[in-house]
Each structure stands twice: as C-alpha cells, then as structure tokens.
Image (spheres, rainbow, N blue to C red):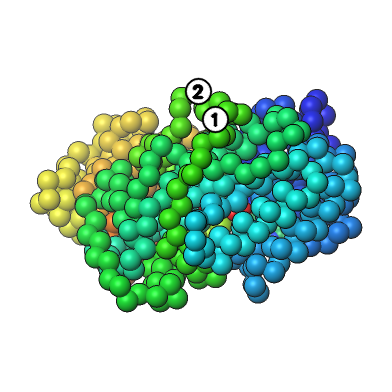
Amino acid sequence: MAETAGRLCLVTGATGYIGGRLVPRLLDAGFRVRCMARSARRLRDYPWAAAVEIAEADATDPDSTRRALDGVDVAYYLIHAIGGRGGFAETDRRAARTFAAAARDAGVKRLIYLGGMEPEEGASPHLRSRAEVGRILLDSGVPTVWLRAAVIIGSGSASFEMLRYLTERLPVMVTPRWVHSRVQPIAVRDVLHYLIGVADLPADVNRGFDIGGPDVLSYADMMRRYAAVAGLRRRIIIPVPVLSPWLSSLWVGGITPVPGRLARPLVESLRNEVICREHDIARYVAPPPEGLTGLDLAVSLALRRVREADVVTRWSSASVPGAPSDPLPTDPDWAGGSLYTDERSRDVAAPPRSLWEIIEGVGGERGWYSFPLAWRVRGFLDRLVGGVGLRRGRRDPRRLRVGETVDFWRVEEIEPGRLLRLRAEMRLPGLAWLELGVSQHDGRTRYTQRALFHPRGLPGHLYWWASKPFHNLVFGGMRDGIAQAAEQAAAASFARSERRKPASRRASRSG
Ligand SMILES: NC(=O)c1ccc[n+]([C@@H]2O[C@H](COP(=O)([O-])OP(=O)(O)OC[C@H]3O[C@@H](n4cnc5c(N)ncnc54)[C@H](OP(=O)(O)O)[C@@H]3O)[C@@H](O)[C@H]2O)c1
C-alpha cells in the first residue's frame, strides 16, 4: 500500500491506454492511487505497480466494485467494453450503473469520466453508448465531471493508431466520404492535464465539458498532416460515396493491425463531426503552461521514440517511458507503429570475452561473417543511390566508440562485454538497427542478434518483404559466422596459453 500523503484516487481501466498513462501522473501529483482491474495479474508489469494499491474487480459486479471503492475520494471512470466480445452498449450500461451505485454507497466525493464527444444528431452506436454512460454517472448523486474528447493523439490510442497505419501504408487511398467529417483532436498530454486538474473542482460542479486541441480539421487533412510530419510523400485521398461503414471497417481491418471488433465501432463514429461546442473547462482548469498542443506537435511527439531511435526501450519491458505520447511496453501488440524484427540467438562454446571481441571487431577488414558477396552487393547498391556504401570501414580494428562509423552503420550504443547497437546509415525506406549481444545462461555463453526495421510508408514495407527471403542467408549466416569465429578464437587462445606454459606443467597435466 502506498504511503504517499494525499487523497485516494481509484483508477479504473488502469490496464487501458489512458489509465496506464494517468496513474504515474497522479502519483507525481501526490495522490495515493488504487488501481482497479478485472485481473490484478495484468498490472504486474507496470513500472509503478509497487507504488499503488491494486483492487481486483469487475465493474458489472456490485460487491467487488463496492470493495474497490472503499475509502476512495476521487474515482476515475475509464472503462469501456468496445473491443471485447458481445454487445458493448448493454455491458457498458450495466457497468456504469453498477459503478455509479457503488460510488454513491461508498461516499466517493468526485467521479471523473472520460468519454467521447456527442454529435448534434445521427450519433453512431459507439458515441451514443459513451454519452449514455456519461448521463448515468451524472445522475449518480456523486459530483461528476464528464470530459468529452474526440480523437486522442498519442502512441497507443486506438483512433491514432488507425490514422497512423492507414497513412503510412497507403500512398493513395480510396476512402468513404467520412474523410471530410471534421474533428477536433487533442494530444494525450492535454487530456491527462485536464483529468488531473478536474480532481480539484468544487463539489457543486456536476456536468460535462468538451475538451479539444487548437486545430479543427477533416480526417483527410489529418492524414495529410500526419504524412508531412512523418516525412512521407503527400497522400492522395479519393473519397467515393459507396463505401458503407461495414465495408470501410473491413477495409480498415485489412490494412491496419487494429483488431476488427475495435476498429468497426470507431470507423462507424468517423462519420460524426466531433468539434467542441463550448470551452467552459477554461473557467475551472487553466490550460497547460506551454498551451494546448497543436496537431503537428502532438503527432511529432507520438513519433518521437522512433525518430530518436529509442526503439529498445520501446520494445522491451524494462524501462519507464517518459512522455504520455510515448508507447508503453504494456500497450497492445497492434499499437506503436510497424516494427519488423529478425531475432536470432545461439549458444557459443567460448567464454563471453572471446565472443565480445568478435562482436566489437565486426565490419571493416573483418567483414560481416556471412555471405560476403551479399554485403558487397548491398554496399554497391547503396553507393549507386548516393549512399555511403561499405567504403567507410572503421577507425580501429578492435575497439569501437559511440558515434563512430562501421561501414554503412554508426555505433549508437555500446555496453562493453554486453551489447553493441548499430544504426543504419545506408539509403533505406525506413530506419534500421542491428544489435549484437552477449549474455550468460546456466554457465553457457549466448550470442543474440536482432535486426530491427521501422518502415517508412509503403516502400518501407515492400523493402522488408522483398529482402525477407534472404534473411536466413544473411542474418542466419551472420549468427553462425560470429559464433564460429568466437569459438575458433577461444580455441586458438587456449592453444597459445598451453604453449606458453613450462613443459613440466604441461606434462604433469597430461599425465
Ligand atoms: N483512445 C481514444 O482515442 C479516446 C478518445 C476519446 C475518448 N476516449 C475515452 O477514454 C476512456 C478510456 O479509453 P482507453 O482508450 O484508455 O480504453 P482502453 O485502452 O480500451 O481500456 C479500456 C479499459 O476498460 C477496462 N474494462 C473493460 N470492461 C471492464 C469491466 N467490466 N470492469 C472493469 N474494467 C473494465 C479494461 O480493463 P481489462 O480489460 O484489463 O479488464 C481496460 O483497462 C473511454 O471512456 C473512452 O471512451 C478514448
């Protein structure tokens, strides 16, 4: 149990996109935090798990929900059932009613709900259901703030991920007419700012607030702006009148990795214009000191991790990403943009030191330990298109430092004896890294190798798939070549040390 002084907040939906990013900010703001999840196990891997209380409860179950709300001052309602199995509207209605009754019974002082924006007319089933939840909570008898947001921009947000994949994968798009609907997106960091700010509102405030960023634009323009920020060519968007929401959700499901049962209700909602109708929130919560985030900056923040080549923290579960716009290792598999990997490993009959010497000496005169012709052809092709090719070699045949070049790579990180990460500087339709590592398992030395590729646009995806048939030859050969070189170096060093020993000791040992 957290000892932090302050009010106790309950965060429901803590395993979700918003909840998982809200918890560390509440802790930073000095709140005590209890997280509610249907399965406590799912919260185990969050870096803040040890700093919060965890309550296992299903919002449709009155008893467990009531227990989770015991002693709570402020309760965040971040639950929704879309993406799950079965009808979401009925489940969400039941969950909201159960939670509202339990919160009243527990004497909760403030309820905060983040929902969607309600269009003037013709709301999709998803937006209708989000609005129904808002009304149930407002009628609960517990002072409630209902924040209404349109598309939230940040890595991991389902609607942002749809935008990302569609724009990155399709240079030309035939789209339904909804691309002309206007929307007022908001950056995830501004959403979190408001979610925390409204916790201090006086008890007589029981109402909804629209929240949005400074830009109002069509989905088509949002895709074009995304393409510009991501450094992609201008996207050609051809709207046609015939695509039904059902057909377009099939189409979105086919192009993007966002699961169909999540994509469908979201796509249906795209036909609705979602623009703030009031900005009353400004009377209660001051905007962030740096102002509300514009779309270009919000997109740029969401892409920051990949841009800054910070892929390792992104795709491993060991680190705590800083900004809310960053991906979290606990995000669903489909979130975070495309990253292709080729991972290989092998036990090596050599001490870790011998393996590390081979890794640190890679490239230049010693080459890449696999299919030398393929590497030379790759270098030649790179030079043909104006790249650096293999001619740069390396400064020192044995030692490497961060920032140095090795043929068409640059050393991005080096942890002596453990990890070498190279970032590609050849001409590529995307960003690429090569990681070579040494570890020990049960007294054995293990070599690990990871090639990572973040494609840029459709050419990037085509490049990866076109080169895939050669990966066994190039990357598999490299793994085996490096392992064998380490084993030979270890054997040679053993033989040398044996030769240096006095003849008498050699004889006594062999006897
Ligand atoms: N993302 C956006 O672009 C966006 C835009 C506007 C508004 N919003 C609103 O923001 C809120 C949070 O959205 P999100 O994107 O963070 O959602 P999310 O990632 O899909 O998370 C939904 C959460 O609800 C929990 N949940 C579902 N059914 C539950 C139940 N019966 N009992 C307890 N927990 C349950 C899930 O927990 P488990 O499955 O782990 O149990 C999960 O943590 C929603 O109200 C949404 O309408 C989101």
Please name the amino acid that badge 1 sits on: Ala
- The residue positioned 40% from the left and 75% from the top of the image is 244
Residue 440 % position (x, y): 59, 48
**For the residue labelled by badge 1, is the local secondary structure a helix, a strand or a loop?**
helix
Horizontal arrangement in the rendering, residue 8 relative to residue 452 (left or right): right
Visible residue check, residue 201: yes
- The residue positioned 64% from the left and 68% from the top of the image is 88
**For the residue labelled by badge 2, is the local secondary structure a helix, a strand or a loop?**
loop
Which residue is disc 2 drawn over? 289
Quarter of the N terminus within the rendering: top right
What residue occupies the far top of the structure in this picture?
A: 289
Visible residue check, residue 53: no
- Nearer the observer, 480 or 88: 88
Q: Residues within 10 Å of mark 1 (few under 14, many from 20)?
A: few
- Nearer the observer, 36 or 247: 247
Q: Residues within 10 Å of mark 2 (few under 14, many from 20)?
A: few
Residue 25 % position (x, y): 63, 33
- The residue positioned 57% from the left and 34% from the top of the image is 281
Which residue is disc 1 drawn over? 282
Horizontal arrangement in the rendering, residue 44 relative to residue 351 (left or right): right
Is residue 182 shown above or below 400? below
Is residue 317 shown above or below 128? above
- The residue positioned 54% from the left and 30% from the top of the image is 282
Disc 1 or 2, which lies upstream in sequence?
A: 1
Q: Measure the C-alpha gap from mark 1 to mark 2.
A: 13 Å
